[in-house]
Image: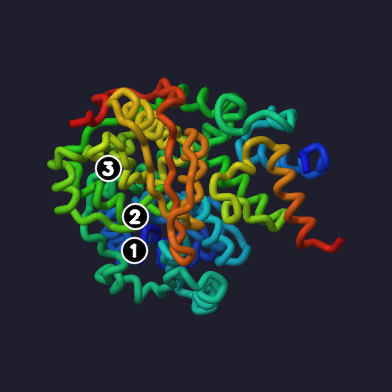
Amino acid sequence: MMVKCVIWDLDNTLLSGVYLESGAQPPPADPAMVTAAAQLGDRGIIHAIASRNPPEAARYAARVTGLDFAAAECGWGRKSDAVRRIAADLGLAPDAVAFVDDDLYERAEVSSAVPEVLVLSPEDMAEAVGWPEFSPAVVTAEARRRGEMYAERRRRLQEARAFAGSRDDFLRYCRTEVTIAPAAAADVPRLHELSVRTHQFNTAGRAVPEPALRELIGSPAHQVTIVRLADRFGDDGVVGGCVVERGPDRAWTVTLLMMSCRAMGRGVIQALLAWLARSAGQGGATALAVPCLVTPRNVPLRLALAAAGFRAAETGPPDQPAALFSRPLTEPPPELPGYVIGEVRSGVTGP
Amino acid sequence: MTGGEAPEVIGELRQILARAAGREELLGLPAQTPLFGAGVGLDSLAGTLLLREVHRRFGVDVAGEDLNLDALATLGTLAAFISERAHGHGPS
């Protein structure tokens, strides 16, 4: 399992010393750990802090390390609880998280309470930079900016909490822009990365290799679509995509639909499903079907499909539940939200 | 069974939903208002938080038992879904 986020202890881990025992001048950053963290950041791995310190310590650490932290839990509770909260806050499964702490007791506590987490000492971490868990095969532009994007996300969430009004009002206030467009060859690495990294919004649950994606983009029987997301807090780049296969009988099958969990709550999946239903109607399709694995992890996707008027029929064997979601094209399609821009040709048309 | 038979469950669900969606005005939501679409506009984020809290609070795994999530049509249907299952498993 690839690590997507490293949660750092501060005292004697990311800092070379103990924050509260250093008097007026807190300890400097640990150069070996900062080097390792910066390397991981370049690969799209994000950072967070779990520390037995007051919240000022996290701000101090961000300043002296120069790193972007997507989340910080400072307090005197159990580290395993801090790790769980950070994973939940960032929408990550515990097996996508590593935890680095110099204290043997803390490492044992996190290991035993959340066994899925990869638990490391600072010495392990210096070496682990070369491990496969920390070495994604492709590093996209989106990946390199991931740390910054999580910092933007925090600012957005803070404003959202203070905002009085509906979610759609907030999306307008943020000047949310969702662009739906045909995929080009340059999008292949990012689409591959999304197929590997997305779980909560993924119908297929398997990695699609780059050559297969290139072939789909060139195939006259398929349309590969990308979705970009930006607002006044920042540009998230390509956050999702889908592959539509049109059958000989003008039936459209969405063989892959995926979206980054970072885009959750920002109207993206809603926009993509509305666009699919509308372009199927306009493109003369006779049916629109979305085969989808049914797992505890992709419940958010099922919620989005239900909200967009799709109905499911069970298809998979009991040990690998799957369903065929479909939407009758005789019914009026969902409204395309006002924040969808760009285009978007109306989709593939029949032969 | 109708939602009308589980007023306490509906009241609690209303609070869970308002918290999940971060919208206080949902505390006054009628039990028959559709949760999807124009009514409440339940999205996948608020929906996931709602289902997680329902599982924690009532021990009912709606997503695991209801492929189409029809239970989420309204607060009333969700309360009925929960009440049927909670009665089946709890002490009589």
For the C terminus of chain A, give its image quadrant. top left
Q: Nearer the viewer, residue A247 or A227?
A: A247
Q: Nearer the viewer, residue B60 or A191?
A: B60
Q: Nearer the viewer, residue A73 or A10?
A: A73
**In this rendering, would A26 be left or right of B47?**
left
Badge 1 marks a residue whose secondary structure is loop
To which quarter of the image does residue A218 belong?
A: top left
Chain letter for mark 2: A
- How much space separates mark 3 and mark 2, taking CA atoms? 17 Å
Badge 2 marks a residue whose secondary structure is helix
Q: Could you say where residue A32 lies in the image, as x and y percent from the top left?
A: 30, 67
**In this rendering, would A325 be left or right of A132?**
right
Instruction: Determine the residue positioned at 30% across, 37% down.
Output: A251
To which quarter of the image does residue A137 belong?
A: bottom left
What scheme was used to colour the molecule? Answer: rainbow
Upstream in sequence: badge 3 or badge 2? 2
Tag 2: residue type? Arg
Read off the residue under disc 2: A197
Tag 3: residue type? Val
Dots 2, 1 in contact, CB < 8 A: yes
User: How packed is label 2: few (under 14 Cα within 10 Å), some, or many (20 or more)?
Assistant: many
User: How packed is label 3: few (under 14 Cα within 10 Å), some, or many (20 or more)?
Assistant: many
Upstream in sequence: badge 1 or badge 3? 1
Chain letter for mark 1: A
Q: Is residue A98 above or below residue A231?
A: below
Residue A2 tag number:
1
